[in-house]
Amino acid sequence: MTRPTFLTVLCILTFIGSGYGIFNAITSYSNAEMAVGLTNDVMEDAMDQIEDEADTEQEAAMVGKIMGAVTDGLTVENVKNMSIANGISALLCLLGAVLMWGLDKKGFWLYVIGTAVGIIAPLMIYKGILGAMAGGGIAFFGIIFVILYALNLKHMK
């Protein structure tokens, strides 16, 4: 049985995306302290600017509360834990794509598990608005790819 072109394209995109995800997880883990420090500096500068430009104190307080929720979740430990989870997610998706490349239906289910890990992990690690934003971003593309792969299940054994 030959692999359909559409499935080939999806697998190649997954190879690239998952490879980048694994690389990014490794670099994020090793640079967690620096990333958190830089992000906190940027958030403080942004908050100062918002306070200067806000029309009311109430507006500034509301934005400050949102930004505070983001920075509260952004700790070195959370960034390292998220890097590990992202690495696991990317690895599962990569292994799933390798199996689907060979038309093995088990690869689809590995890919679904990898996508689920990518969606659930930020909700559990970061919690709050930061977790929702990170999980939502991953869910958008992950679910699209799961649907596209599901359209190809009929070609797999």
Image (spheres, helix red, strand yellow):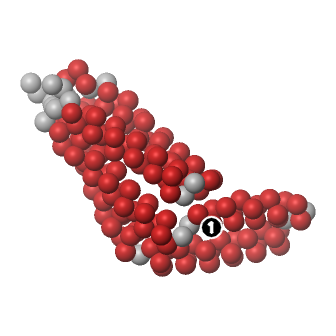
| Horizontal and vertical percent position of residue 27 | 36, 70
* Quarter of the C terminus within the rendering: top left
Residue at x-position 28% and y-position 47%: 92
| Residue ranking furthest to the top | 154
Position in image of residue 109 (x %, y %): 28, 34
Q: Nearer the viewer, residue 60 or 117?
A: 117
Residue 5 visible in image: no
Determine the residue located farthest toward the right in the rendered image: 56
Considering depth in this image, is 91 or 2 the residue closer to the camera? 91
Would you say 105 lies left or right of 121 here?
Answer: left
Q: In the rendered view, does 45 fall on the left or right side of 16?
A: right
Residue 44 can be seen in this image:
yes
Residue at mark 1: 71
Q: Residue 150 at what x, y percent from top left? A: 32, 27
Locate residue 4: give its quadrant: top left
Secondary structure beneath dot 1 equals helix
Q: Where is residue 66, by image quadrant?
A: bottom right
Q: Position of residue 43 (x, y in %)?
A: 65, 71
Q: Quadrant of the N terminus?
A: top left
Kind of residue at disc 1: Thr
Mark 1 closeness class: few <14, some 14–19, many ≥20 residues within 10 Å: some
